[in-house]
Amino acid sequence: MSLDVFSDDVLMTKFCAGDAQAFELLYARHERPLYRYVRRVLGTALEAQVDEVFQDTWMKLVDNRANWREREDASFKTWLFMLAHHRAVDVLRKGGREVSTDHGWQDNAWLDDEAESPWQLWPASSVDEPEQQAFWRKAGQKLLDCLDGLPALQRAAFLLHHEDGLGLDEMTRVLDAEFETVKSRLRYALSKLRACMGAYLPPAVK
Amino acid sequence: MMDMRDSHLEKALQHAPDRELQPNDEVRRCVLAYAARPVKKHWLQYLSSKLNQWHVTPAQLGGMSSVAVALLVLLMVHEQRPQEGEWAPPASSEQVAKADRLRKQAKVAESAPKPMPARETAREEKAALGELQATPGEIATRADVKSEADKLQVEPPSMADAAPVATPLQESTSPAPAAIHGAEGEIGAAAPMAVLPEQRAKSRLEPLGKNLAMEDDSEDSDLQYELMTQSGTALAERDIQAGKLRLLRVESPNGERCDEPITHAPQVDAETGYPVEVMDVCIVPVALMDGVRAYNQEMRAYKRQANR
């Protein structure tokens, strides 16, 4: 019977029982999402430490496998991203990066650099597929640039919710914060990113 | 579940150029190799898993722990040797027999042509008797043993019966080789009830006294003992009244000479004109030096007073 049919939690339990193949499958499933998350949370300034944080996260998971218990309220993915987030925050703090502030709306002076007018780049529905793809690739790059300007915790909240699909409840565990705090960080992040994206978002979203 | 996703931002994120990035192969190999290592269980985890296998309840675990602690304490108590000053049980018949055997060996040594066995031999004898030395504080000095033996001679037979091992001690009244010290000491230790109460205080200095006496001269040893236990001034006054005018000097020969008897040439103190008696002591206690100093001061003071 192939291991592919098992959930992450079952695979982790198998790994704790000594099944190395279960871990390989877990790693394959989460390698890229976790790597992206670490890379984006650390930002371009700490890009050189992405590999280190990523590797440390997995090693910590391996070291703490004895603590793993299948639970209804916390999945393997939540645990994995929590370990990664804690490690990333450690590196951010050591690197002197801003981590803990939940800035208000007013301090977004960097948004003023946006020169393009709204809707200017938004593709018309009539354009062909390659052009649409090109637009979204540019939008993706713009979003990464905008993310780089966010405080780390707001960035983490946005990424966990949009990229990794975690709900707010799970995010409270990963970010080790109250529900309202997480919600607030996410709201701030969305507002700033929408403003930053400018011409790459349709008028209705703006 | 509350959802705050922005579909447009989500779509932009899905098209971000870093989408296909992944860690390099070296990192992947390192992580997978790390995970494939055999698990080294902590000993507590191992114990816990074993206990779980045996279905041991916490109450049973507590009971086993108590037994283990009790065994440990018993073992420690059993291994503990008696300390100085502690009560020692009366000697067993085996111990008395061993003491007799040593005394016989001492007799043989006495009849030998050698004037005195080496002190080292005496120490070895003492070491051999170490197991018998239950309470060093109860060991009587040779002088004590002598006086004890004298007393037993004049006291009613019942007293002698109370200390049956005291009879052989009478042999020690004659000048004995140093090897006998050990046997005598052990006889005293083997029958602590035979030691009189007033002698117990004196006997506490016995270990020192044994080191003090270089020559087997009982008078010299007694003087050393008195100098340590009594006022040197009082001893000098006693000697002055008895007309015994002298000064004392302590010498501590080193090495091999410590085991040999030393004959000193007669010495006279230049200041007082009194003869100087030399006491050879291997290990010089502070109490003896203080006693000698006070003794000599008193003698010199007497001389100065007499000159006036």
Image (tube, rainbow, N blue to C red):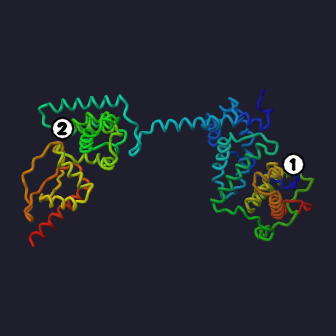
| Residue B32 in the image, given as x and y percentages of width and height | 65, 38
**To which quarter of the image does residue A91 belong?**
bottom right
Nearest to the observer: residue B33 or residue B226? B226
> Residue A129 got which mark?
1
On whether disc 1 and disc 2 are found on a single subunit, the reply is no
Q: Which mark is residue B168?
A: none
**Chain ID for label 2?**
B
- Which image quarter: residue A151? bottom right
> Depth check: B159 or A197 in front?
B159
Q: Are marks 1 and 2 in contact (CB under 8 Å)?
A: no
Could you tell whether A10 is left or right of B24 in the image? Answer: right
Quadrant in the picture for residue A206 = bottom right
**Residue B186 visible (yes or no):** no
* Residue B77 appears left or right of B32: left
- Pick whichever, A14 or B228, lies toward us: B228
Question: Percent position (x, y) of residue B196?
Answer: 33, 44
Question: Distance of mark 1 from mark 2, alpha carbons?
Answer: 123 Å
Label 1: element kind: helix
Determine the residue positioned at 11% across, 57% down. Answer: B276
Most distant residue in the front direction: B156
- The amino acid sitting under disc 2 is Ala
**Is A13 on the left or on the right of B147, as rendered?**
right
Picture coordinates of residue A186, whole percent (x, y): 82, 59
Tag in front: 1 or 2: 2
Q: Residue at x 76, y 58 (%)?
A: A155
Left or right: B235 in relation to A94: left
> Relative to B274, does residue B258 appear above or below in the rendering?
above
Residue at the spot x=29%, y=46% of the render? Answer: B207
User: Where's residue B173, x and y in %?
Assistant: 20, 39
Q: Mark 1 falls within which chain?
A: A
Q: Which residue is mark 2?
A: B176
Residue type, numbered disc 1: Glu
